[in-house]
Image (cartoon, rainbow, N blue to C red):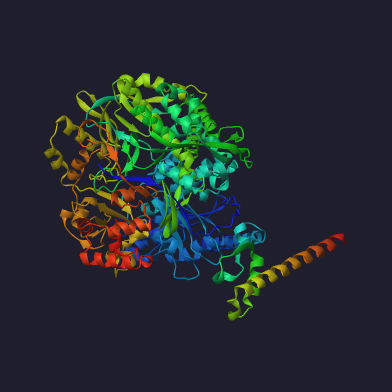
Amino acid sequence: MSEKLIRYRANRRERVEDLNKNTAEIKDGSDIVEEHHIQSRKNSEIKIPICLACHNYITDKQNSLSVEQRKDSKLLALKSILAMLELTCEHFRFLIEKEIENDK
Amino acid sequence: MTSKIAIRGYTKEVNKKEKPNFQIKEELLEHKRLLIFDTETTDDSFQNLKFGSFIIIDNEKEILKAIFYSPENIPHNEENILKQYCLQNNIPLLITKEFIENILYPELLEVQTLCIGFNLPFDLSRLAIHFGEGRYAHKDRFSVKLSENEFLPRIKIKHIDSTMSFIGFAQNRKKFKGHFLDLKTLASIFSDNKHITLRKAGEFFGCNILKGETEEHGKITPQYVQYNLQDVNATYDLYLKILKHYKMYDIKAPITKIYSSATLGKYALKQMGIQPLSRINTKINAKVKGQLMSAYFGGRCEVKIRKTPIEVSVLDFLSMYPSLTINMGLWDFIISKNIGEKEVTEEIIKFLENLKLEDLRNKEIWRSFNVLIELEPDEDVLPVRSNYLENAYVLNVGINYIQYKDSLFYALPDVIASVLLTGKIPKIKKAVRFIPLDKQYTLQKANILGLEIDPNKDNFIKLLIEKRQEFKQKRDTFQNDSEDHKKLDGVQGALKILANSTTYGIFIEVIIKENSSDLIVYSKDEFFARQKAEEEGKFFNPLIAVMQVAGARLLMAMCERYLQERNSTHVYMDTDACYVPSSFTFELRDFFKPLSPYSFEADFFKIEKERLLFYGISSKRYVLYKFQNGKIEIVDYKLHGLGHLLNPYNNGVEWQKQIWGDILNLHYGFITQQDIIEKYSNFYALSKLAVSTPILYKRFNSFNKNKPLNEQIKPFNFFLVGQGNKTDIKPMVSYSKNAQGSVFKPFIDYKSGKIFKGLEYWKSLADTILEYANHPESKFLNGSQNGILKRRHLKDGEITVIGKETKNIEEQSLKVERIIEYKSEEEKIKKILSMSVGERKERKVSKSTYSEMKERLKKDPKNFNWKTKAVKKILS
């Protein structure tokens, strides 16, 4: 490989690293907002915009149900709501911890 | 005469999934890292990639410049030349696969580099190893596969027109669509030239590096490689110049999102916090939108005195649509929070009863013209869209006498025009005035083109036009070649583009969906149908568009009436220009003076050309000329319908001008028809098109079958299409430099996809020209005669509701009818069941197929298959 190409590759690697550093911050709404089907895509069209992290968490919780259970849309919705409540609790717990830390 | 009357409709899908109403803020990306590339191809009809070059720029610093090539398309000796050139100049040489997998994808996907090219779809498609078409809603796009590596996403290309395409990555794990920029799009927007080339664009924007010139294409020589490298540099230079020009607009949108001047307009409105009609609370619901759409007709265009030379002056209205937006108070609708309605039937009747031409010179009165009228036409002169010639596939708008048994909707300016031209008041059933109420609370100050605009106080359109005039005057104080002159000229051009793009097109923009769905069609009446829906454009507001165009037609009618009163007539009209006998030039200019909405001194109806001879065949087919020392000297011409034909001489001769010269010589008897036949009979009428859509690409299936990719006609390759000679066959053949010689080759029929051969299928240029010279002005009663034409009388026509009228060059030369006719199922059933034997035979459907179809329909109309070929033929 020619010297020019080697130098180019090094430069590109640097740029990718810079980019990855920057993407840790919130950059674009499309990356963080996801439309979540509360009763799963197959059962219903109802969906709510939530953040990507929440979407992943709730989807994992829903996926913990068996295949048979997943056919029950009410159960799926219940699972979603429970997961959301858990997340809300988690969020408040985090805020309180932060507050205590600040007070110290 | 009973004929078809077509009116526009507004569609709404029944089960449309509403998208969540939250907006994602677009990030203003300053692209620091760029990849610019250009390719060179074989000069045969397959246009296979031979080699190409690219540069990668980071923060205006060149990071890498290299060449790539396809060994399979290059002879051994040329490969050696390429290798030697790279060695001598210390330029890395890669094969195409390496370039794609090791440079292009890592750059575009991982580093999110901006990919730049001039005519980018063509260059990207040269790198492809396979082409597919999108599915479902994306079936109008190409899916271009560049690598066998399954993890590298395909590239999707949707062609809109010759200067505009949507390009992006197909679905990928990063959910990243990529950044692609076709400089041809931006160059054509800012230069207002659809046929711009890289060289012309470079000259227009004053680039330091221009596209190079080469004697021979297709054969690799050191000069040819140099030429390609220069092209890449010229493209980069052009990008910098265009970026600078774009920044002048102060539009807060990523440069990659600018697809047309309309996009600029939309972003400008958004910047001022203006909300579209769909977001504000108005009385204009789907039903009213349908009624407004049914009153929508394009600008007025007609030849009134046909094939009779007459001395004329050309006058046109100063910035017609922006001026009407100001005079009719339409800006208030754009910024209003709410639009109200008020019934004003009696007021309008009274107004029309006392109407005099002189009254319309008061511009204050125009503000009260935003009225939609329901009337029963009875020999009133109104715009009618119809296929005036039997079996014609084109729908034309003509201003004709119309009588109809039921009510139709028209805008008040059209009704006023009718009163002016007939002297009688139509049977008005209801008149509703639209009133703008309050201003939107989201309005905010904005900086656009260096001007501080407060939409709460300023009339944006008026400000743009007045500032433009100011800049023009300033520009003229400098010398033509000076830097200041160029700069000011650029600003005034930008102001013009912005004023036009924020006044008309965006308010009538609809997007045709690719798939059929259940919908309600609103128009004069409303009905259910299952067809392709039309989705509203972002700033869709039919009220504004309808009133503007109707206002423009009223100005034309005023001109016609003025001449009528003086026992004369106009000669030709086109949207905002009127060609009138020379003796009326100055009095007409003065007549319209009071209507100018601007504070500067300028004629509202300005004189463009004076004392020239006019010879017109039909709309947009005319020539302006004079006699100089006994010889015809052509000053200006329009050659609608022939403009897309290839120059048969294959040189720089203005051959279209020559055609007009011949038509005029034929008229004056200087030459005979036989002379024209002799001159052009050895040439054929051919157009050069690109394989730009999957539908077109499919037509080459029979040609491409069982061939390797480099022997196939690929997307974005050029091909030639003939006019078709009296048969149903439309010949298409792959492009070659000697276009006229292509007629001897076997060709593909556009309709059937079968392969034929024979000269008899190609129409000669002589026939095309002679046919052209006799083209009737069909919107008039005696449209095939010479002299003054008379209006048609349309009586109790059959109403059909249609969708968007699309006409682009490709469709023109292929004569592909794409207008959607909305029909309710009951109407369709009635049509099938009541078809006469003659009509059935005309549509080439056999008796047995037809009777079977009828039986199925009677038995189970709900589950009837409307998609079979025979059903489509019957309904056509």
**Viewer-proximal residue among B593 and B800:** B800
Q: Left or right: where does residue B875 sit relative to residue B496? A: left
| Camera sees residue B220 | no
Residue drawn at x 64%, y 67% as measured from the top left: A55
Q: How many marks?
A: 0
Q: Left or right: where does residue B671 sit relative to residue A30? A: left
The image shows residue B210 at horizontal and vertical percentages of: 42, 44
Occupied quadrant, residue B698: bottom left
Say which quadrant the C terminus of chain B sits in: bottom left
| Camera sees residue B830 | yes
The image shows residue B155 at horizontal and vertical percentages of: 46, 61
Residue drawn at x 49%, y 28% as measured from the top left: B469
Task: Look at the picture and state if B787 lies above or below B655.
Answer: above
**Viewer-proximal residue among B74 and B43:** B43
Task: Look at the picture and state if A4 lies above or below B281.
Answer: below
Occupied quadrant, residue B76: bottom left
The image shows residue B714 at horizontal and vertical percentages of: 34, 61
The image shows residue B404 at horizontal and vertical percentages of: 33, 41
Q: Left or right: where does residue B470 sit relative to residue B39? A: right
Residue drawn at x 20%, y 42% as measured from the top left: B771
Say which quadrant the N terminus of chain B sits in: top left
Occupied quadrant, residue B45: bottom left
Farthest right residue? A104
Q: Left or right: where does residue B789 sit relative to residue B182? A: left
Residue drawn at x 58%, y 80% as measured from the top left: A67
